[in-house]
Amino acid sequence: ANLLRGRALVKTDRIYSIEFKDVSFRVNNEQMNTYVLRNCSFVIGRHDVVAITGKSGIGKSTILNLLMGFSYPEKGTILINDEIDLSDLNLLEWRNHIAFSHQFPVIFNNISLSENIDLLGDGKQHQIFPEILSHQGCELSGGEQQKVSLERAFNSSRDIILLDEPTVSLDQKAVEILESFIRNVKTKRIRTIIFTCHKSSLLSLADKIVFITKDGETKCLQNGQSQDMLPDEFIKLYGNADNKPH
């Protein structure tokens, strides 16, 4: 079925919206046979900055995998531009709209770091972390590899940027640099940015926060939402001050 979906002929030139509509997804293997997402519904608009959050292991990366077409919902649909089922899109064409920075990045040691960064791009070399170009690929630490992966995603000209736990291996200075860069991109309204995070100041950058509850449901929180309207589970996880949306 996935092969047939990947060969679908439906294409779209521009992405205006992505809607999860009553999406449920179940992990079915020897270790688990349970739903990690249940009846999830939320909308991501064009040029939105969206944070997907919740406690560790709750299913944040699953949402990114569904967006990439690595997996498909067991129930519900993912609608593109209000009318196209993601499963009907040609996957190769769809993924050409997306730059994905994984939390376990792939670095190719047979090419330069500059070439690694430009794998999805057009030679602009944004250089969020310009010092990274002085390193050799085989000598990179985990944090340095993540910097290359982030550079690669933002150096692309793709409509949608997916960032899976983008700060997990970065030191505090690098986190602040990344936050500043995302804030600048957000101001220009030229990209849709979707990132997963937990206990992170990145939450304050989001227009919208998709919070995954312990039951696998999603609560969509708008930036600036009153503290009184936040779910208790969210407050318990993030506290009352610095990490709430504001």
Image (spheres, rainbow, N blue to C red):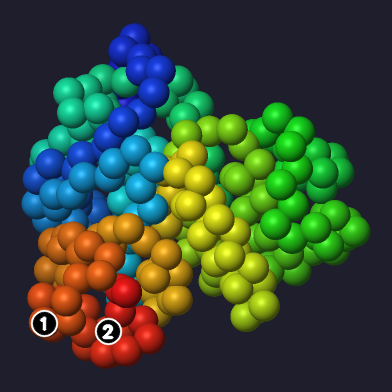
Q: Are marks 1 and 2 in contact (CB under 8 Å)?
A: no
**Which quadrant would residue 215 be assigned to in this image?**
bottom left
Vertical arrangement, residue 64 with respect to residue 225, above or below: above
Tell which tag, 1 or 2, sits nearer the viewer. 1
Neighbours of disc 2 within 10 Å: few (<14), some (14-19), many (20+):
some
Residue found at the very far top of the displayed protein: 9
Instruction: Say the numbered circle drawn on residue 52.
Output: none
Q: Residue at x 82, y 48 (%)?
A: 113
Relative height, residue 168 to residue 50 (above, below): below
Which x, y percent locates residue 46? 34, 38
Could you tell me if residue 228 is visible in this image? yes
177 relative to 20 in the view: left or right: right
What amino acid type should be assigned to the residue bearing mark 1?
Asp
Residue that badge 2 annotates = 237
Question: In percent of the image, x 27 and y 84: which residue is there?
Answer: 237
Quadrant the C terminus occupies: bottom left
In the picture, measured across the screen, residue 88 lies left or right of residue 114, that is: left
Label 1, label 2: how many angstroms apart (C-alpha)? Answer: 15 Å
Q: x, y (%) of residue 219?
A: 15, 63
Instruction: Tell me if I can see residue 211 in this picture.
Output: no
Q: With respect to residue 243, does 63 lie above or below?
A: above
Left or right, residue 110 beside residue 213: right
Residue at mark 1 = 228
> Mark 1 Cα within 10 Å, few/some/many (few <14, many 20+)?
few
- Secondary structure type for disc 1: helix
Q: Quadrant of the N terminus?
A: top left
Name which residue lies at 26% across and 29% down: 80
Badge 2 element: helix
| Residue 181 image point, x, y percent | 60, 59
